[in-house]
Amino acid sequence: MFSVALALLCLASVSCSAPLPCEELLRPLDRVDLHGLVGRWALVAGSLSNLTYLDRFKQRDSATINFSSNTSDANISYTSSIRLHERCLYKSYNISLQGGSFTFDGTDRSNLSASYVHTSCPDCLLMRMIAESGRRQHLYLFSRRREVEQKEMEEYKAQVACLNMPPPAVMDPAKELCPEETAEEQKDRATL
Ligand SMILES: *[C@@H]1O[C@H](CO)[C@@H](O)[C@H](O)[C@H]1NC(C)=O
Ligand SMILES: *[C@@H]1O[C@H](CO)[C@@H](O)[C@H](O)[C@H]1NC(C)=O
Ligand SMILES: *[C@@H]1O[C@H](CO)[C@@H](O)[C@H](O)[C@H]1NC(C)=O
Ligand SMILES: *[C@@H]1O[C@H](CO)[C@@H](O)[C@H](O)[C@H]1NC(C)=O
Ligand SMILES: *[C@@H]1O[C@H](CO)[C@@H](O)[C@H](O)[C@H]1NC(C)=O
Ligand SMILES: *[C@@H]1O[C@H](CO)[C@@H](O)[C@H](O)[C@H]1NC(C)=O
């Protein structure tokens, strides 16, 4: 009874800002709207549980993902671009979306599971990837913007902490993104 009263008091008080429990912070999305997903997103920050991978990740100047979908069903693809040491690396993946999670079609990423996690940032996409049966995981914050508000970054850092992952690498918004690939370039790359 006492805690209910306290909770009500908390709701009524503007200054009450108890940290959200991890369960709430890491709430997976039930579903992702395909139309909201398509197009290009800039990587804002990322944390990786494996420090070797995190160090490598920190060398990136910038990164994006661009989801595209032809059909109304859940088979979609995305192209990632990574700017690293003045070069742009592009890679495409076919994925199958099931509610708020997806799997990779094809073999080289078949052990990776990915899901979307709730975020209060309105134009962000929070992607959690789990590999090696949970021994390794990544949490990436993407946005339509190059950087997010301090409040949104704090929420993301709390989410990373909930997963016991190292503090995230925050991308420098002043660094250029890779240019969009033309359809021709994409085709050339696919046939290499
Ligand atoms: C995203 O990819 C689609 C399909 O390849 C392409 O038509 C579109 O121009 C790309 N959009 C951006 C913003 O890169
Ligand atoms: C991190 O990844 C590297 C390279 O794959 C591996 O050698 C190392 O054992 C991993 N570290 C942990 C703690 O899993
Ligand atoms: C969309 O469909 C057309 C025709 O079926 C195909 O040529 C094109 O590669 C598809 N694009 C994507 C991004 O899947
Ligand atoms: C994605 O699927 C399309 C159509 O099935 C295929 O042509 C393309 O090669 C696939 N791309 C990758 C990266 O697997
Ligand atoms: C969607 O992807 C699955 C797995 O790769 C494949 O079996 C299925 O044929 C695809 N559906 C369409 C409509 O491309
Ligand atoms: C996927 O995981 C299984 C069991 O951990 C392993 O044997 C297999 O080599 C992995 N496949 C890939 C493509 O990493």
Image (cartoon, rainbow, N blue to C red):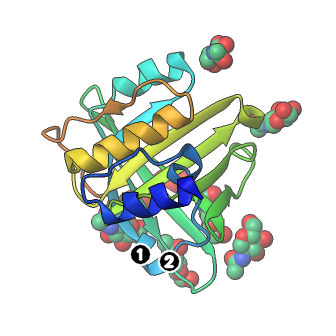
Q: Nearer the viewer, residue 44 or 5?
A: 5
The residue lying furthest to the left in this view is 174
Q: Nearer the viewer, residue 190 or 91?
A: 91
Q: In the picture shown, does residue 148 fall above or below 28? A: above
Task: Kindly indicate whether the residue at mark 2 contacts the one at mark 1 (C-beta within 8 angstroms).
Answer: yes
Q: Judge the density around disc 2: few (<14), some (14-19), many (≥20) Cα neighbours within 10 Å.
A: few
Q: Circle 1 is placed at which residue position?
A: 36
How far apart are labels 1 and 2 at the CA level? Answer: 5 Å
Residue at x-position 36% and y-position 68%: 39
Q: Nearer the viewer, residue 155 or 58?
A: 155
The spot of residue 133 in percent (x, y) is 77, 36
Q: In the picture shown, does residue 172 fall above or below 31? A: above
Quadrant of the frame with the N terminus:
bottom right
Q: Secondary structure at mark 1?
A: helix
Q: Amino acid at mark 1?
A: Gly
Quick check: 185 left or right of 22?
A: left
Q: Amino acid at mark 2?
A: Asp
Residue at x-position 48% and y-position 32%: 161
Picture disc at residue 33: 2
Residue at x-position 74% and y-position 32%: 132
Q: In the picture shown, does residue 189 fall above or below 55? A: below
Q: Secondary structure at mark 2?
A: loop
Q: Would residue 78 be visible to someone looking at this image?
A: yes
Residue at x-position 39% and y-position 47%: 141
The residue lying furthest to the front in this view is 2
